[in-house]
Image (cartoon, rainbow, N blue to C red):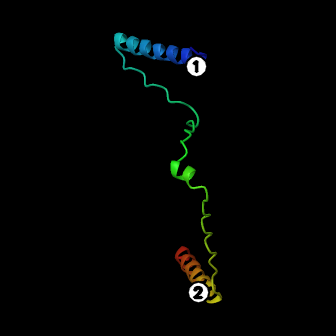
Amino acid sequence: MGVSEILASVDREIALLQQARALLGGSAAPAPKKAVGRPRKIVAAPKKAAAVAPVAAKPAKKKKRNLSPEGRKRIAEAVKRRWAAQKAATAK
């Protein structure tokens, strides 16, 4: 038995004893403490399909989308109208 297993069994015994004391004392059982910190990462087994295929194709990069000057101008005008409407609403 390792140290961690011994500590785990001691913690279980303490929890059981606290529950028994709470029942005998007439008070409600204390809520179990939550583990503090980030949960441990579970390492997944590698997929068999990836192991079988020796040559893997790289995923295609997404093409960068560029805005036309006309589109940029329309957006700028719409933002200016929005700001003007907000400014008028707060001035009232």
Place residue 73 in its image quadrant: bottom right
Q: Residue 85, how many percent across, how many down?
A: 54, 80
Foreground pick, 43 / 4: 43
Foreground pick, 47 / 91: 47
Foreground pick, 32 / 51: 51
Place residue 65 in its image quadrant: bottom right
- Label 1 sits on a secondary structure element that is helix
In the displayed structure image, the side of residue 77 where residue 31 appears, left or right: left
In the displayed structure image, the side of residue 77 where residue 24 appears, left or right: left
Q: Residue 40, how many percent across, how many down?
A: 57, 36
Residue, x 55% and y 73% (percent of image)?
A: 90
What residue would you read off at disc 1?
4
Q: Residue 32, how many percent across, how many down?
A: 45, 25
Looking at the image, residue 56 lies above or below residue 86:
above
Residue, x 59% and y 80% (percent of image)?
A: 79
Residue, x 58% and y 77% (percent of image)?
A: 87
Residue, x 46% and y 13% (percent of image)?
A: 13
- Label 2 sits on a secondary structure element that is helix
What residue would you read off at disc 2?
74
Few, some or many residues within 10 Å of mark 2 (<14, 14–19, 20+)? few
